[in-house]
Amino acid sequence: MNELALQTYEMARRSVVKVLRQPALVIPPILFPLIMMGINVSGLDAATEIPGFPTDSYLDFAIAFPMIQGALFASINAGSSVARDVETGFLNRLALTPMQRAAMLLGLFTGEMLIAFVSTLIYLAVGFAAGLHFASGFAGVLVLLALSLLIALAFAGLGAFIGLRTGSPEAVQGVFPLLFVFLFLSSGSLPRDLIEHDWFRIVATWNPVSYLFEGLRSLIIFGWQARELALGFGFAAAIAVLGVFGATTALRTRVAVR
Amino acid sequence: MSLAASAGIEVEGLVREFKNGPRAVDGIHLRVAPGEIYGFLGPNGAGKSTTVLMLTTLLPPTDGTARVAGHDIRREGAAVRAAIGAALQEAALDPLLTGQDHMRLQTTLQGIPKGERRARGDELLERVGLMDAADRKVGGYSGGMKRRLDLALALVHRPRVLFLDEPTTGLDPSSRADLWDEVARLAREDGTTVFLTTQYLEEADVLADRVGIIDKGGIVAEGTPEALKAEIGRPSVEATPADRADRDAVAGVLSRFGSAVPAPPGAAAVRLESGENLAEVVRALDAADLAVADLQLHQPSLDDVFLAKTGRKLDPPASEEPAAV
């Protein structure tokens, strides 16, 4: 294994070990989105009766919600973890080793993506057990996992940026409700063309999170839709580039060593 | 070859200014010889930690420069970092990782060959007495255990120069003594150069070959503890009258033997002129019919040196009770 891969592996291992040793960081991020999905599926099932609703199973529509929510938790984990490293001086310890700076973030992101990947598998397993239909078949499941990973990277990048910039786990936690607002002001609960209020529909149309939902959902409900997939992957990649670039710049400022 | 070329430290006019603040470090010069323990003594906010951050390349200087183990901190950061180990203020550990996890991460990131990592980690954990606790999460370690692990992690790559920033602050006396033993052993047996910042006069006195006293960003005195104390030279005598009303009368008698120095409330003290001794003081107090509850002769200490150089006493931070182990 080359040096960068080895260092990335060790940093990713640290991220995963830390999460596994805190049940509070494992159980709620998996359970809470599933509970939310259960409530939505049983409470909003009647929405499938609305003319134009794309499926007669609200579960098929709602399964994307926990996936995005899980990625959101990854952003909080990544941000809090790196902010705590700033706060405790652990980042200085790392900066004093000859490790490649890229490995610091690569390791963190790899760890968070791995956790998001396992969470998505659990959501899918629960979904299939509850009768989820998957229009794009097995290949679609693989593409969905890839998109989920990219979304997790995007959100983890944003979280790491905020964590490194502020150096405060509390500040990262403080941003959480704001990110949650983005989740709800999107097409997460209803297709955009069925949102009655104009302001909500306009906000959901401008909200990039809508296209993440729609990309994931297209694979489940419709099969292969090039436009939805391109927008989903495109917005996820754009947010990931922004987040990773921001985090890299913030890290460079934090460990301004030659 | 300059003294810093092998494993020493040479500092030339190092300055660090922070935005809208005073100069945290104001043009200091110092030299530390290879294998020497240099005690950097000063109160909170004197500039000790800022100096360490610059010497370890974690903070760029505003002006001046330094060579650590022969490498310029401004231009050869990577070479400096490869030569040094550092245990900075507050043990920088992850509470969720075990001692063994930390050692694994540190040995890997320091580039220790795969086949040697485990043995090197175990050797260091053994040396600092943490082998039994190696598989426990660091969050449950006491303050002393954290400091010892921090020290062990700093030694993973066998650094030639070791920076310890207030390594015993907050430790109970027993943990402090253990750490002193280990630091002394490092310098004596391994020839490691140690740059140690401290607020504890006793620590500097016991451990350091030479001491630099820093106050308000500048070095106000430097030398061996013995030389600095000899500079102050004479002992002081402190008398506490049995009746507090006699305090001024006692001070008057003492003033015949030397110049007044600060004393606790209700007591008077003077630094003795050469040739004076305690017996003469006792006789003079007796002749003046002054009853004394307590009479003490103080040999000069680094505290006296600090007082003489800065005009105030250095109040060390309080020790904390050890955390539950």
Image (cartoon, coloured by chain):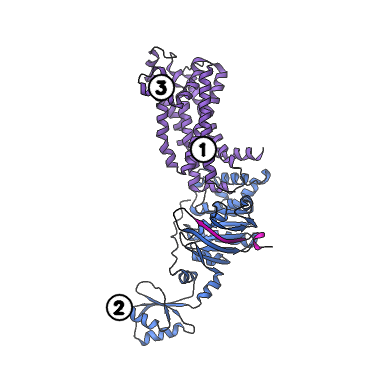
Chain colours: A purple, B blue
Give the Cα separation between the discs numbered 1 and 3.
30 Å
Q: Which chain contains the residue that carries disc 1?
A: A
Q: Please, what is the three-letter code of the amino acid marked with disc 1? A: Gly
In this rendering, the answer to whether A43 lies above or below A156 is: above
Tell me the residue that label 3 is attached to. A189
In this rendering, the answer to whether A256 lies above or below B261 is: above
- In the rendering, at what x and y percent does residue A145 appear? 54, 25
Residue extending furthest right?
B1
Residue A115 visible somewhere in the drawing: no
Mark 3 residue element = loop
Q: Give the range drawn in magenta.
A: B2-17
Horizontal side, residue B55 vs residue A187: left or right: right
Residue extending furthest left?
B245
Give the numbered dot on residue A246: 1
Give the Cα separation between the discs numbered 3 and 2.
84 Å
Tell me the residue that label 2 is attached to. B245
Q: Which chain contains the residue that carries disc 2?
A: B
- In the rendering, at what x and y percent does residue B289 appear? 34, 85
Q: Which chain contains the residue that carries disc 3?
A: A
**Between disc 1 and disc 3, whose residue precedes?**
3
Residue extending furthest bottom?
B287
Q: How crowded is mark 2: few (under 14 residues within 10 Å), some or many (20 or more)?
A: few
Q: Please, what is the three-letter code of the amino acid marked with disc 3? A: Ser
Indicate whether residue B269 is drawn in magenta.
Answer: no
Q: Residue at x 61, y 40 (%)?
A: A7
Give the numbered dot on residue B258: none
Residue B311 visible somewhere in the drawing: yes
Horizontal side, residue A32 vs residue B191: left or right: left
Q: Residue at x 40, y 33 (%)?
A: A178
